[in-house]
Amino acid sequence: MRLLRSWLSPEQRSEFDELGYFHVFGCVTGNKYRIHPGSYANVLEIGEDGTPKAGLCFLPKGRLVPGDVMLAQKITLETSECVALAVAHRFPASMTPSQIAR
């Protein structure tokens, strides 16, 4: 988590501290994404009205701790959004990770 926090902007760090998640903007579409703590099914695409539009599940290969997964998700969306979207599994924003794992 220390490594993740060192890569967050001051605004993202403040969101993470206050809300338990932070937002990033896709480098191609400009879409807003919310990254929650976790290792899978923890990214939400946020609609223009500020509500979750869809869930995204994508993560790096290997067994990484949640902070490292979240950092990889942040960097990928901010620098290679199309790659993330091409491999991401989409799910309804209302589903929880335990429902997705079934």
Image (tube, grey):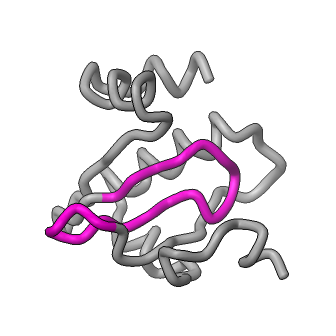
Query: Is residue 25 in the magenta section?
Result: no
Q: What residue is rendered at 54% in x and 78% in y? A: 87
Number of numbered labels in the structure image: 0
**Residue 12: percent from the left, percent from the top?**
32, 31
**Residue 50: percent from the left, percent from the top?**
22, 61
Q: Quadrant of the N terminus?
A: top right
**Residue 99: percent from the left, percent from the top?**
74, 76
Q: What residue is rendered at 27% in x and 19% in y? A: 10
When asked about the image quadrant of residue 40, the answer is bottom right
Q: Nearer the viewer, residue 47 or 58?
A: 47
Q: Nearer the viewer, residue 70 or 18?
A: 18
Q: What residue is rendered at 15% in x and 69% in y? A: 48
Query: Is residue 48 in the magenta section?
Result: yes
**Residue 7: percent from the left, percent from the top?**
42, 25
When asked about the image quadrant of residue 76, the answer is bottom left
Q: Nearer the viewer, residue 79 or 100?
A: 100
Q: What residue is rendered at 66% in x and 47% in y? A: 38
Position of residue 88 relative to residue 9, above or below, is: below
Q: Quadrant of the C terminus?
A: bottom right
The magenta stretch is 33-51
